[in-house]
Image (cartoon, grey):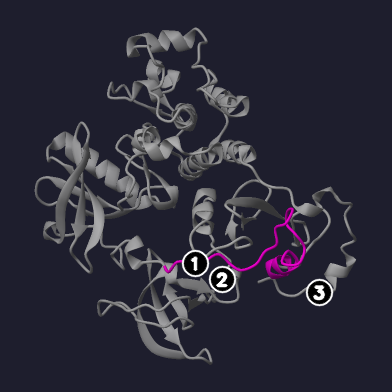
Amino acid sequence: MSHPTYRYVSQWDFKGSTRQELSFKAGDHFQALDRSGDWWLVEKLRADGSRTGEKGFVPNNYMAEEGTVEEQPWFFRDLSRTEAVNLLLKRGNTTGSFLIRVSDKQGFVYALSARSQNSVKHFRILQDEQGEYHLNASNFFVDLNKLIEFYKVKPLAKGLLLTSPCVKDEPTDTDLNPLPVDEWERPREEFELAQKLGSGNFSQVYEGYWLGRVKVRVAIKTINQDVTNQETFVRETTFLKTLRHRNLLSLYAVCSVGNPFYIITELLAKGDLLKFLQGSEGEELNLDALLDIAGQIVDGMHYLETKNCVHRDLAARNVLIGQNNICKIADFGLARFIKDDMYVSRSKEIPYKWTAPEALAYGRYTLKSDVWSFGILLYEIMSRGIIPYPGIQNSELLCYLKQGHRMAAPQNCSDKVYNVMLDCWMENPQKRPTFNDLKINIDNLANYEPSEESIKPPKSKGWIKKLRKPVI
């Protein structure tokens, strides 16, 4: 049985810093031998495609798959709306600068984001049953290049023509797990603690440095060694080793020899979402930016949903936020993989005001109890960090909920967003939406622009079909 051949081209120069790493120039070609992890094992190819025998590890975020849309300068793959806005409003971009990003939302594959003076407009790129792309019912294109060329001469919206691709910053290999291979256990001497970032019941979190291959800033969670904490350490690291998603915190390494234990993860510059929302930057966020944060969290939770994993501690304090407001769900100390659709726990160590009624009363946790918690988190987002159920004590909460009471909408929160919260807070867990449903609901609240031709009668598609070529 033959295996697929994965060939890639580098988009930037890279100079390796160890014998394991392969240096290369932009435009070099490679065959991937092992694509597990952030560092891929590849073999460099000659211009004619023949193999050179030169092998090593390369950072995967420098690579684009040959013959695909990834090679295009305007293609930015996984990017949130807020990241797209921040990039397009940077120096070097002007009106008409644009990018295309992947969307896993219901009904469309890609989104087109374009700068319009000092704002950014977003357009859904739809695809029909024949595989043709379109923004409206008037014009259809056999590939994304044709769509882009069309809207360089025909306005997307009033006065808005596409001009040049958004300036693409070179990635850094320090964005990736510093280990090119799957080696979780590392010696304590490789890590240096710096300033303390926070603490919990069993742990403390520090900003620190990994002094191994290169000096990399990381977050180091320390857990004092005893029987109970060892179970917590093993449980949390086991979860993090099996989960991989851009909206979940990435595990880098662990130290399980000596006291305290270390859990080393990526460091997100802006800290936890709760403090971010309560700060000056959070106050300036508009509805679109708040919904983008909610949408990123839903994307991460939907991934957990597909893994049959219940988080049990979803709250703004347990979401971390980085550059361009990228969000990562963290703190998997209470998480569990569930069988038979339910996990039962009698533990009293629970986040009371974020926990679903059936879990408070009977210790029953399902994927739908995380949906309830997301509704509370959405309240935190829209209120910019107000503590849930103000004025109600934990001892009063379950009775309050069983009587059918729910929190009122936060100030300036629209009915549509509040209705999403109420759906999450349905008493019957089966009537709550799934995270897949929430992906659709949140995205439908986001603002996508209609294109200029949307109000015009559609044209025949016959003239486009003559131009059909392989999609790039």
Residue at 19%, 34% in the rendered image: 202
**Which amino acid type is marked by label 2?**
Pro
Q: In which quadrant is the N terminus drawn? A: bottom right
Of the residues under marks 1 and 2, which one precedes in the sequence? 2
The numbered dot on residue 92 is none
Write down the region rendered in magenta. Answer: 144-170
**Which amino acid type is marked by label 1?**
Lys
Q: Quadrant of residue 281?
A: top left
Of the residues under marks 2 and 3, which one precedes in the sequence? 2
Question: Is residue 118 something that shows in the picture?
Answer: yes
Where is residue 338 shown, x and y percent of the image? 42, 36
Q: Nearer the viewer, mark 1 or mark 3?
A: 1
Q: Which residue is mark 1?
A: 168
Q: Which residue is mark 3?
A: 467
What distance separates the C-alpha of mark 2 from that of mark 3? Answer: 22 Å
Of the residues under marks 1 and 3, which one precedes in the sequence? 1
Q: Which residue is mark 2?
A: 73
Front-most of 466 and 171?
171
